[in-house]
Image (cartoon, coloured by chain):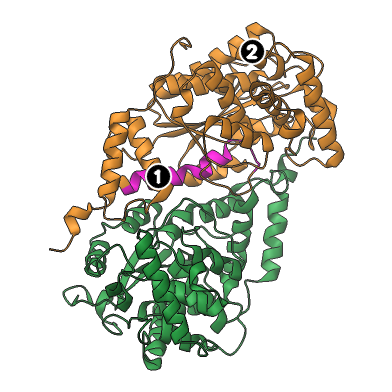
Chain colours: A orange, B green
């Protein structure tokens, strides 16, 4: 991961050619709306007009536990993280069903689950960074070395998928309590107060929300003066799974492979990744608007508008997978619609 | 078409069972948002939990010309209608590309194209009602008999598709100038002024918009006092293709087959269909929000919120096809996600 130079965007020349083709289709100018725009973006990312069909799409669900989960910030007990990792491995989670429907290959990576998953395949568990991450209102989530190791792990995973031919990548999150560090990351990087980033996660009540807000506020106060360096922010307020997600997003952009972002975790990590690797955001599209307020702030800072707004808040990469057909629609129109010049009468 | 009784909605019992299953999935309650809701709606429409996969989806593009097109309300000449019918038959239109991508069978029906299309297959042209429809600011679009014949034609086509095993239907529109009568229908049924329903269609400039608004205002004034009867409204302000669309929508609801509505034309016809056959709207879902203001008014009156909002204004049923993957996502989660009770630890 070279973080010294600004990451170059998808080719402006190819983007211009894609827009030229779009404008020449047998449709009124602009009539395809964002479907046409996203097709042109994919073309530019691939360096080819028309773009190739998106047949190789990979989602990695990065799983980890979070110390804050023991402090009343979630509607579910931490043991659910392990159960859900196993459910994804069994192909029976929400994202599994969506991924099968839309032709996405899902893998789950145990980055920091606080459980012994050693009976699962090594591809899932073999690169675990640690069990859980620190409760961020009381202590740093990670050491600096662990944060760096997590970043490198995410980059390594993305690089392997790119080497293996992935045309489009997605990240998903899994881990009870993870909306708390994710919201804290957004608040720290964008300079927002806890009130504005605290959401209801998997479904906490008003008391739970207030506890969560207090945890985020305490965490932000604890790290005051240490937020200029994004790696430091990840170590202090993030987690191993979130740091790995940041590394994944930067590597995808560096390698020139587009990413569909998912909900709060994915977009919070994108904000940190863009801070670490300016320009990377040009390689990402926002899949869906989650119900988490911090996601809206984070998307705005990245200049991204989600493709879908369906009230989803499942995590696991489900919103990215649900949005994939919009990207495929964009590719299809650029590939398969006649040019107006071919069909005009006279 | 029996228009005397209120159309019954999808089974409330099955809907309740579908929601019960949804609530029991290994996802936090409500976390699937509208994806879960739409899956439950499909289940209720099918009378089966979980719902069957949507493998047989049919779109009919109802084509016709409009007298108003000769009066400066469109950015394109009327001859484009014929060209686009041929482009759909050739499988090269915008909707053709989207339908291939998403597994939808498309047929185009020449209801009232003002051209000789007799070289095309009889399935396309064999049931033509007339060539074009009257310029609605000057004369009625159709005779009452033609309006009734068009309604019956649309119902017949929908009935044939249902008999043939279609699980989900869509209507698309094709015809230069058609946003003018569609907006007039919405204005007449909902009691709105021309200013509030006039949009830019395929892309007219400010002068064109003002002309279009004046045409709609003149049409509304011309038919004042005749808007209580929806069939009369279709004859006066609609067109043969729009009347056929109304018949199609009513028949689908009567036969208990769900429909994904498309843009302005589809939704304007839905408003008329709901007026003719109260209760029918329970069988429809809105595919996408078009950029036409009349569609927003019409959707609101039907109590429908679109699944997609991507700035599309192509017509042809393209927005309905683009939204289909959201319905398939809903079906997939209800079918394939584990129940929480199956995976809970302990």
Residue A328 numbered mark, or none: 1
Provide the chain ID for the residue under circle 1: A
Look at the image and tell me whether residue A314 can be seen: yes
Return the residue nearer the eye: B125 or B273. B273
Q: Give me the C-alpha separation between circle 2 and circle 1.
A: 39 Å
Which x, y percent locates residue A95? 58, 40
Which image quarter holds the C terminus of chain B? top right
Task: Tell me, yes or no, if residue A111 can be seen here.
Answer: no
Residue beneath the point at 50% across and 90% down: B226
Instruction: Give the number of the disc on residue B151.
Output: none
Magenta-highlighted residues: A313-333
Q: Which residue is mark 2?
A: A228
Measured as percent of width and height from the top left, residue A13 is found at 28, 30
- Circle 2 packing at 10 Å, graded few (<14), some (14-19), many (20+), is few
Q: Nearer the viewer, residue A234 or B259?
A: A234
What secondary structure characterizes most of the magenta part?
A: helix
Find out whether residue A326 is within the magenta segment. yes
Marked residue chain, label 2: A
Secondary structure beneath disc 1?
A: helix
B44 versus A125 height, above or below: below
Q: Which residue appears farthest toward the right when viewing the image?
A: A207
Queried whether the magenta region covers residue B85, the answer comes back as no
Instruction: Check if mark 2 and mark 1 are on a common chain.
Output: yes
Q: Of label 2 and label 1, which has the lower sequence position?
A: 2
């Amino acid at each position: 991961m070279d973080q010294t130079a600004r990451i170059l965007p998808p080719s402006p020349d190819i983007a211009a050619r894609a827009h030229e083709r779009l404008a020449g289709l047998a449709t009124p100018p602009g009539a395809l709306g964002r479907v046409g725009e996203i097709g042109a973006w994919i073309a530019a990312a691939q360096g080819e007009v028309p773009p190739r069909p998106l047949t190789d799409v990979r989602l990695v669900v990065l799983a980890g536990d979070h110390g804050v989960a023991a402090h009343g910030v979630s509607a579910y007990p931490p043991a659910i993280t392990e159960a859900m990792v196993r459910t994804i491995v069994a192909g029976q989670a929400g994202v599994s069903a969506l991924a099968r429907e839309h032709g996405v290959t899902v893998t789950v990576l145990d980055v920091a689950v606080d459980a012994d998953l050693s009976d699962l395949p090594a591809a899932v568990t073999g690169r675990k960074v640690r069990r859980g991450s620190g409760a961020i209102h009381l202590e740093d989530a990670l050491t600096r070395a662990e944060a760096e190791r997590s970043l490198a792990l995410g980059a390594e995973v993305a690089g392997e998928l790119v080497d293996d031919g992935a045309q489009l990548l997605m990240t998903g999150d899994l881990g009870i309590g993870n909306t708390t560090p994710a919201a804290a990351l957004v608040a720290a990087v964008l300079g927002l107060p806890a009130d504005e980033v605290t959401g209801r996660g998997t479904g906490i009540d008003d008391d739970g929300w207030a506890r969560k807000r207090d945890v985020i506020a305490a965490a932000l106060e604890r790290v005051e003066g240490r937020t200029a360096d994004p790696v430091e922010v990840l170590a202090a307020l993030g987690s191993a799974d979130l740091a790995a997600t940041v590394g994944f997003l930067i590597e995808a952009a560096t390698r020139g492979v587009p990413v569909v972002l998912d909900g709060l975790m994915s977009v919070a990590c994108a904000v940190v990744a863009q801070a670490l690797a300016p320009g990377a955001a040009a390689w990402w599209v926002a899949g869906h608007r989650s119900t988490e307020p911090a996601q809206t702030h984070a998307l705005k800072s990245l200049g991204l508008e989600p493709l879908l707004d369906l009230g989803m808040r499942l995590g696991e990469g489900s919103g990215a997978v649900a949005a994939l057909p919009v990207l495929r629609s964009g590719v299809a129109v650029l590939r398969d619609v006649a040019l107006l010049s071919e069909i005009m009468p006279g």
